Image: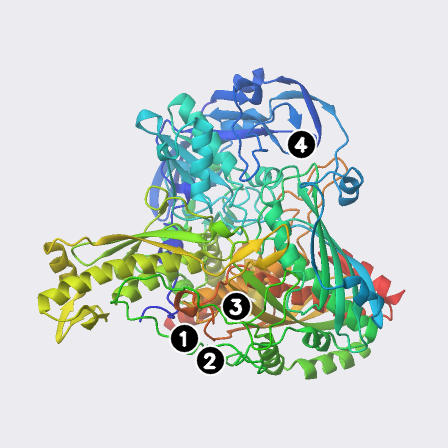
Amino acid sequence: MSKIHVTTKVNGDEVEYLCEPRETLLDCLRDHLDLTGAKEGCGTGDCGACSVTMDGRLVCSCLVLGAEAQGKEIATIEGMAEDGALHPLQRKFIEHAALQCGICTPGILVAAKSLLEKNPDPTETEMRYWLAGNLCRCTGYDKIIRAVMDAAAEMREAS
Amino acid sequence: MSVRTPLPHDSAPLHVTGRARYVDDIPTPATCLHLAFGMAQIAHGRITSMDLDAVRSAQGVVQVIAGSDLDEIPDCSPSAEDEPLLSDGTIHYLGQPVFLVAATSHLAARRAVTLAKITYEEATPLLTIDAALEANSRFEDGPRVYEKGDVDQALSSAAHVIEGRIEMGGQEHFYLEGQAAMAMPQDNGDMIVHSSTQHPTEIQHKVAHALHLPMNGVRVETRRMGGGFGGKESQGNHLAIACALIAHRTGLPAKMRYDRDDDFMITGKRHDFRIDYRVGVNDEGRIAGAEFTQMTRCGWALDLSLPVADRAMLHADNAYHLPAARITSHRLRTHTQSATAFRGFGGPQGVVGIERVMDHIAHALGLDPLQVRQRNYYDDAFGAGVAQGGLSAPPGPPEDISGTKKAGTAHKLSSGTGASKRFGGAHSPEPMAGGAQTTPYHMEVTDFLLNGLTEKLATDCDYAARKAAIAEWNAGQPVLKKGIALTPVKFGISFTLTHLNQAGALVHVYADGSVHMNHGGTEMGQGLNQKVAQVAADRFGISPDMVKITATDTGKVPNTSATAASSGSDLNGMAVKAACDTIRDRMAEYLATEHQVKPHQVRFADGMVHVGAEEIPFAEAANRVYMGRVSLSATGYYKTPDIEWDRIAGRGRPFFYFAQGAACSEVVIDTLTGENRILRTDILHDAGSSLNPAIDIGQIEGGFVQGAGWLTTEELVWDETGRLRTHAPSTYKIPACSDRPRIFNVALWDAPNPAETIYRSKAVGEPPLMLGISVWSALADAVSACGPNYPDLQAPATAEAVLAAVARARG
C-alpha cells in the first residue's frame, strides 16, 4: 500500500510525515511525530482523550485521518505552554488538584482552551456541557470545573 | 512539616503538559512487534477447526500462535491456574482469546485478526444466576455461610418480617488507559516488562512461569497507570505474558494494548449480585435478626472471586449492628468474562444489600429512612460522639462541611532518633468496657464513629428541613418528583488474605542530600507516591521536592502485594518510614558521636540537621556521614499487626480498622421518562488525619461519582448468546461532566485514626465509592413519592428502571 506524504503545521511548526491512508491523525501524532500527549481512550470519538484542534476547531484526532491534516494547522497539548510558561488552565489544574491519573487531562485542557477562545465567560452549565464529551474516570469532575472556571476568570482579568 | 499538606500530585506538571509517560507512550525500538488477540465468537463450546492461513499471510504479520501451537499454554490466573493464555480448544466465554498475532504495527495486528476462519461445536452457555444455580455450576464445594446468634428465633419472634430481593449489575472499570504491556528481551533470555498493572510482582511471577525462568530472570517496571480501579490487579497478566512469549520466541521487543472494545470483551468487571433478604424488626425499625443470601456471577474462571464474595459477606452489615445474622454466599460459575476486583472488592455489593433493607424497613413501617439507619447503627466509640467508653485516642473536632481543612490534631510520631522500631504494633483500638458489639463475623467494633458523623452531616446539610420541603414540593408536582437520602459507609481495611498485608521499601540518601524513594505500591492516579514522598520528606525534615519518586520495580522491592484493598499508603507509607528511620538513625548516631552528644539530641527539621547546638544543612550532613563511611541506603518493611481471620469459619478480626463516612444526596426524577439528575450532594468522610487533604478529597469525590455511576447509568447488557452488547463508551455510560451533582460539598471528618497507622491517617481509596449509594437511595425515595406501593427499585437505576419503579409505586 503506498503511503501518503503529508505536510502540516503542528503547534506552529511545519512538519511532514508519511502515513497509510487508513491511519488516524492520532496515530500519526503519536507514532510519526512522537507527540504522545493525545491519548487513545476509545478510538470511536466518545471519550475525548485524543482531543486536538484542527484549524482552530476542536476534534477527536481518532476520528480524523492523518491525510486530512494536509495543509492544516494542528494544535496539541504539547503546544499549550508557551516558552516554558504554563497556560493559566494548566496552572489552575495543578492548583485545584483537578487531575488524578492524568490520562484524560491533555484532552480536557485542549477542549477547555477551545471553549474559552470562543467564549471567555462561559456559565458553569455551558462549561459542563462543553466538556461532557471528555470522560474522566478518576476525579468526579468537580475540581476540573472549578479549575476551568477559575482559569477563565483569571484570563478575563488579564485581557 | 510535609505531611497533612495539600500538595499537588507529583506528576501534575507532567500530566498538564502531556509529558507523563504511560506504557503506550514509551518510545519503542523500530523492531518492536505489536500484538492482538483473536477472540472466541461463541460463549461455550469447542473449536472444531481453525484456519489461520489468511491471518498468517496478512500484511505485516510476523507470527501467529494458537493454543495448539504451544507445548504448554501459559496460565494467566492469579489464583487457580485455570486461565490459559489461549483457548485449549474449549471456549468458556464470548471474547476469550483463542490465538495471538504479532505484527509490525498495532493496526496490522488488529486487521489480521479479523481474517481467521474458526468453526465451533456450540454448547448451551450458562449466562445467568438462575441457569448456574440450576446446573449447580459454582466455585468451591457449596455456599459459604457466616452466622451469629439464632437468626431463625429472631425472625420468628419479630413484630415484622420484611423480605425482598435486590439485583445489582456489574461495572466496567473503564480506566481511561486500556490494558497495556511491553516486553524487552535481555541477555540470557531474561525479560524486562513494562506493564500497566497494580501488581508488578504478579506480572513477574506469571511471566517467569510462562517462560520457565526463575523470578530473578524477569524484572517488571510500572511508572504509572491511567487508572486502575482493581481492573489492573490481575487483568494485565494476559498482555504481559503474551508480550514476553513473543519477545522470547522472536528475540524482538513486543508491545500489546487492547483496543477499547477488545478490553470490554476480554477483561473481567465488577461482580453482579442478587441478594435475597429477610429481616425481623420491631415497631421502631430496629433489626433483631437478618438473613442475606448473596448470589454472584463469577464468570468462567476463579480469578479473585472468592475474596470478593467474602468481602461482600463481610460488608453485609455495613454500619448496622445485627444481633443475629446469617449470610450465605453462592459463587456461581458462568460462561461470561471472569469477574474481577473493582474498587470496593465485593464490599459495595454487600453494603447495597443492607442499605436496601433500611429503605425497605422505612417504607414498610412509614418511618424516615435516616431514623431507621441511626437506630440500627453500631455504638460509637468513646469520644466519637456517643460515650460508650474505652478508646484511648479521642478524635479531634470535625470540620464544618463547607470549611477548609484545619491542621491535623493527630498524635506526634516518635522523634525517630531512637531505634527504627516498627511503628504500629499491638496498639489498635482496645476492646470496649463491658464488651463491644460484634459484626456477623464476630469482630468487635471498637472504632465506630458514624453516630456523631451522621448527626453532624445531617445538621450541616439541613437534612430534616429539606426532607420536609421536598415532601411539600412533591405534593404540588404532577411530573417531577424529588427524593433525598443520607447513607453511611463503614469499610473494613486490610486484605482479607492476611499474608498480603505486608510491604517493602528501598530508600537511598545520596551524598548531595537528595533522596531516592522506592516502594512496592503502584501509582494509578490515587496520589500514593505523593503521599508516601511526604512521609519520607517528613522523616528527614526536608522539602518533598528533595525526594525523587521512582517507578515501581520488582528489582528494587521484591515480593510485593497488589496496590489494592485501599492499603497503598497504609502499607507502603509505613515501609518507607521504616527505611527512612533506619538511615536517619545511622546519620544521627554518626553525627552525635562527631559532636559528642547523644543520638536523641539530633533532630531533623526544616532542611537542617540539628546536632546539639549546631545546625547543619541536610545535604552537608549527608555528605559528612558518607565521608564517615556510613551506609545511606536502607530497606524498610511493614506488616499490619493484630489481624487474624478464618474465612471458612467466618470468625476473627480480618480488619485492622474501619474507614467511615456518609453522604446525603438529593435527586429529581421525571416520572414520564425516568430521566433523573443529582441536585446536591454533601459528604463528610473519615480519612483519619489525612496525609494530603487535596488528594484525599479527590479520592472521595471520584469514588462517590464512580459509585453513583455504577448504580445509575452504568448498565452491562449481555444478549442471549452471551455477547456483551455494551462494549464501548458509545453503549456503556459512565458519568460525564454534565452528570456531577449541581451542588457538591465534600469535607473531611478530621480525627486521628485510633489504630496506629501512618501518621494516624486512614485508607481512602475504596470507601468513598459506597457514598454513591446515597444517590440510588434518593432515587428510590423520589420514586416512593409517586404512589403508595413499594417501588422495588433495582440497580442500576437507569432511566428505564426508574420508570418501571414509578409504575410499580403507582400500582
Q: What is the crowding at mark 2: few (fewer than 14 residues within 10 Å), some, or many (at least 20)?
A: some
Q: Earlier in the sequence, mark 1 or mark 4?
A: 4
Label 2 residue SS: loop
Q: What residue sits right under mark 2 in the picture?
A: B396
B519 or B639, nearer to the observer? B639
Circles 2 and 1, Cβ within 8 Å, touching? The answer is: yes
**What amino acid type is highlighted by mark number 4?**
His
Q: Chain of mark 3?
A: A
Can you tell which of label 1 and label 4 is closer to the viewer? 1
Q: CA distance from mark 3 to mark 2?
A: 41 Å
Q: Chain of mark 2?
A: B
Q: CA distance from mark 3 to mark 4?
A: 51 Å
Q: Chain of mark 1?
A: B
**What amino acid type is highlighted by mark number 3?**
Pro
Label 1 residue SS: loop
Q: What residue sits right under mark 1 in the picture?
A: B410
Label 3 residue SS: loop
Circles 1 and 4, Cβ within 8 Å, touching? The answer is: no
Viewed as shown, does residue B198 lie left or right of B348?
Answer: left
Q: CA distance from mark 1 to mark 3?
A: 42 Å
Up-down relation of residue B661 to residue B513 (above or below): below
